[in-house]
Amino acid sequence: MDIFGVPIQALMGQLMLGIVNGSFYAVLSLGLAIIFGVLKIVNFAHGAFFMLGAFTAFLLAQHLGANYWTTLLVAPLAVALFGMLFEWLFLRRLYGLDPIYGLLLTFSLVLVLEGGFRVAFGSSGQPFATPEALRGTLNLGFMILPMYRGFVIVAALLVCLVTWFVIERTSLGANLRAATERAELTQAFGIDVPRLVTLTYGVGVGLAAFAGVLAAPIFHVNPSMGSSLVIIIFAVVVIGGLGSIMGAIVTGLGLGVVEGFTRVFYSEFSSTIVFLVMVLVLLLRPAGLFGREEG
Amino acid sequence: MHLRSLTWPLLIVGLLALLAVPFFPQLVYSVFIMKTLCFVLFACAFNLLLGHTGILSFGHAAFFGTGAYVTGQLVKAYGVPTELGILAGGLVAALLGAVIGALAIRRSGIYLAMITLAMSQLVFFFFLQAPFTGAEDGLQRIPRGTLLGIIDLNSDAALYYVVLGIVGAGLWVVWRTVNSPFGQVLRAIREHEPRAISLGYPVARYKVLVFTLSAGLSGIAGSLKAIIFQLAALYDVHWHTSGDVILMTLLGGMNTVFGPAVGAVIVSTLNHYLDPFGAWVTVIIGVVFMTCVLTFRQGVVGELGRLLRSRHVPKPTKAPPHASARADSQR
Amino acid sequence: MPAKTPLKTFALSSMVLAMGAASGAMASNGFSDDVVRIGVLTDMSGIYTDLSGEAAVEAVRMAVEDFGGEVGGVPIEVIYGDHRNRADTGASRAREWYDNDGVDMINDLSNSGVALAVAAVAEERQRHAISNSASNIGLTNDYCSPYVTHYTYDAYSLAQGTGKTIVEDGGDTWFFLTVDFAFGIGLEEQVSEVVREAGGQVVGAARHPLDTTDFSSYALQAQASGAEIIGIASTGADAINAINALSEFGVSPDQRPAALLLWYDDIVSLGLEAAQGLLLTNAFYWDADDETREFSQRFYERTGRMPNMAQAGNYSSTMHYLNAVEAAGTDDPDAVSEQMRELEINDFFASGGYIRPNGRMVHDQYLWEVKAPDESEYDYDFLRLVATIPGEEAFQPLEDSSCYLLEHNQ
């Protein structure tokens, strides 16, 4: 059976790959959405933190001989700490101002990080081996999926669900949501709001770095690997609905699939389609697919 | 006000210096100044939206680049006289601005910015695919032609004065707009949109109008750049250019009329003179921007104005206008 | 330090001002402003820094030092600039160099858009420009002039090298993974033509946007095409991601990837594990013979990296330019242009190389295969020579060039 001249089996394969690709978008947009929700800042450095995660993993493996599983844990934590330091030192001076200043500051950070890594490691990037245990392939019937790609889906979705659970179902998450809505009141209840904000930024960039480590074995590790990501990721968050955690995850996956099919039918357009979708969604559903309409 | 008494002498000295540029080729390179002038016009036109109406457009490269490509193609392929080519570049950009503006202003804030970004990405895609643009090689070897069939623009000096004149006229339009009743309504929209609506102003129409004007002037800036360098390139429609103009505006000061001009000069100069630092240039620019954002939030001109004011009129420092509106997000 | 800081430029400029405008003044000894100034216009801070960048500047400096630091009794000076991969920035820097700073020759010109823009400026200002790292054959066609030289390689030689050899080797059905840019599409067309002429068949192509990271979808499409050869018409990160995806999805052994523009540096960053067996056309490899090793060793000591073909080309072309200046006894662009086309190029980079009237430097090209990890015996031992493509075959026949300098176009 064919759809537009493409066998259905091939389409199933493309769907699967779209989900893999969407898993990256889901983790990245989740991080961006959390940061935007609490800090009201477009974290323009999200792609740079993605790159930082991949590079940290590379450096850990190269110089300390760390195995992949260690890097998957340590690199995001290290990047999260760096992010929290950045928030604590610089970003917090801009709270209460027009969010555009936060955007500008994080954009400057991109220049520093990408430029710095290019000076230190060159522009052409580094090889990164797929972990031994995940080198095989899985036969799904309709396609042969490299095992690592299957692992990406599982790991990404697990992390997304845990994050969602913490925010929506635990008391920490409740505090966070309270701080988002009524900062002063929450502070009055004895909750250290600034620390909560720092922590949120750490979690957000940690997620970006986690996606970076996941990407390292299959996407080329180089200083500009995240530079075109941020506007796509932000579009995903907006399509999902600003402030909606589930919206970011689901839209991320969905975009991966849509992009995958575009690569089959109109490949040149595949990096632009997200913007077409965004215009349509914003004009038809102003608050995004999963967002709440505000008064 | 002392600030105002300083303004005119400064402007006159600046203007004289600008007029003298072609006579000192070894001091400043006139093509570099021309390029900077294009960005000055671009940034000031952009700030009609951001600073004066409170609308953040993240897609202004679409207008700048459209101006460049339209002018370039008309002059190169169809032999249209340069002055008409520039005019056409501005008009097409303005038309595009009207369309994108009409769509975008149906939303506000970050959503509006995202619609403009998305539309500009579609425009980018169009120019990437269109056969006449030469994709990443650019539309090259655009003839400079003559002005009104008399003045040969291949002379840098002649072109310089033409560019100076056009940019000057463009800035005058910006200044007039800001200081007109129309500009006052725009400010009313920025400060409190519901009130402007309840006062009976057709706010949507005003917004589309200012969008169109801003896009048209940005288009002319792009057109001029295409004539100066004799090429239009993909970077002109890339979202990085949209980002650059936001940067210039904020560095200079978005709550001033000509602050963005200063911002454009700063960015342009940094890019021009940092070459000896080789690979470090990106890092240095990043650190400079970071320092600016953290230390003078109202931009160079904004802070300068504040400094002068506070020295002569002792009065508590005024918070940036947007701070009060967003006090709810204060932590 | 040979690089000029703005302040120095300023001081120098004021001095020159006193002597008269830099651009026109020709001293009695035949050398404009008593110095031969070479500008290296390259990507110092962007995605091509490894391909050219500081190492390209260093290559030019080495050539100048090896030449003796002066020519015809006047000193040679090297300055550099960053074009940021933007044609306008490159063109504006080139203009300023020619107009104000008395630059006689601009070298490197990575990025085709920049190279074309500078070629246009060079023709207008009648000064020399030599491109080593750009691939666009427009430089020796519509953008040709007596002052523009295309030195190391071009899209045509890549197609002749990789495309032709593979088809003759039996790989006659092709599928292309092409970056949706003028560069990629042009390269795809060049190779397609070669493939068809040699009796092969092109069964399809997928065009992906620049900076695509996930190539898995394209790997499936390539697999489904059933083509024997998957031609990768992109470079840098795109090509690397494509190669990785193809190997991850196991397209070999029935299908074989052929990278149409792969740099030596790309192999370093791919690693031999992923790159082994790849075929690539490069004009230069450091480990080819004693002469290349000698140069590369010296280059390595200065830059910490082995030279790629563009950097070797930067050295060789600078040397050739200086030889031409010496032979002409002046830095007058027309006289130098004549000598450049007259003199033969014989060094570690090329033997019997010469420059055609349209500015094309003709020299042998080489097809290399990437070694497997266990075949690599020492550091940087990456490539094995597969075939030599004689210069006459490697480059576009003169009669096909649209260059206005050629008789058939006049």
Image (spheres, coloured by chain):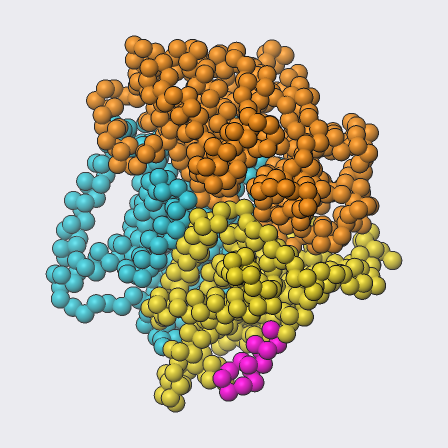
Q: Residue at x 59, y 64 (%)?
A: A67
Of the chain colours in the picture, the one used for chain A is yellow
What colour denotes chain C?
orange
Would you say residue A165 sits in the magenta stretch? yes
At x 36%, y 75%, the residue is B330
**Nearer the observer, C149 or C205:** C149
Asked if residue B314 is positioned above or below residue B230 in the image, the reply reads below
User: With B309 as the anchor, is B68 left or right in this view?
Assistant: right
Q: Position of residue B164 (x, y in %)?
A: 32, 36
- Residue at image coords 30%, 21%: C22
Q: Residue furthest bottom?
A: A189
Question: Residue at (63%, 12%) from the top-left corner?
Answer: C408
**Residue C24 visible in this rendered orientation of the protein:** no
Magenta span includes C332: no
> What shade does chain B have?
cyan
Image quarter of the N terminus of chain A: bottom right
Q: Position of residue C216 (x, y in %)?
A: 70, 54
What segment is highlighted magenta in the picture? Answer: A159-173
